[in-house]
């Protein structure tokens, strides 16, 4: 079973920057894409934040465009999310996602990011 381990959650001041990382292991097929989703409140659906295919195509949610940058290290099977100009509404549990080339999705357990003064 693919395992995704996130790191980097924590408390950040509004306007600040923060970086999330995720590393995948136990991968048995090729990776189609890796990315980040978030859940802003319990019971809410996870929403896409940013996604990056192995081919290099990126997708960003409108609410993070210009503020967040996604990047991947293909050799390490990892994906990072560099967040800047953080806002209180960015407070959420951030989940790492991996979609393999059979279009199966795998998820990390999530890491909490709190944006507050």
Image (tube, rainbow, N blue to C red):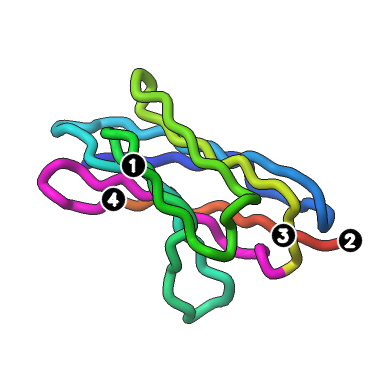
Cα distance between the residues tagged 2 and 4: 33 Å
Image quarter (top left, top right, bottom left or bottom right) of the N terminus:
top left
Secondary structure, mark 1, is: loop
Q: Is residue 4 above or below residue 25?
A: below
Judged from this view, the residue extending furthest toward the left is: 102
Relative image position of residue 61 (x, y in whole percent): 49, 61
Nearest to N terminus: mark 1 or mark 4: 1
Q: Is residue 20 above or below residue 73?
A: below
Q: Which residues are magenta?
A: 89-105
* Residue at 35% across, 28% down: 77
Label disc, if present, on residue 18 of the rendered structure: none
Nearest to N terminus: mark 4 or mark 3: 4
Are the residues flagged by discs 1 and 4 in contact, CB closer than 8 Å? Answer: no
Secondary structure, mark 3, is: strand
Residue of label 2: 117
Label disc, if present, on residue 57 of the rendered structure: 1
Cα distance between the residues tagged 3 and 1: 29 Å
Judged from this view, the residue extending furthest toward the right is: 117
Residue of label 4: 106
Question: Closer to us: mark 2 or mark 1?
Answer: 1
Cα distance between the residues tagged 1 and 4: 19 Å
Q: Is residue 77 visible?
A: yes
Q: Is residue 109 visible?
A: no
Relative image position of residue 28 (x, y in whole percent): 15, 32
* Residue at 57% across, 55% down: 65
Secondary structure, mark 4, is: strand
Residue of label 3: 114
Are the residues flagged by discs 3 and 2 in contact, CB closer than 8 Å? Answer: no
């Amino acid at each position: 079973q693919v395992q995704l381990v996130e790191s980097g959650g924590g408390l950040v001041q509004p306007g600040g920057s923060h970086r999330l990382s995720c590393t995948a292991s136990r991968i048995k097929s090729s990776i189609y894409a890796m990315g980040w989703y978030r859940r802003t409140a319990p019971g809410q659906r996870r929403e896409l934040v940013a996604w990056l295919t192995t081919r290099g195509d990126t997708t960003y949610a409108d609410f993070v465009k210009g503020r967040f940058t996604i990047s991947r290290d293909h050799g390490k099977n990892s994906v990072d999310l560099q967040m800047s100009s953080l806002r209180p509404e960015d407070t959420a549990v951030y989940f790492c996602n991996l979609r393999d080339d059979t279009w199966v999705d795998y998820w990390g357990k999530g890491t909490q990011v709190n944006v507050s003064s």
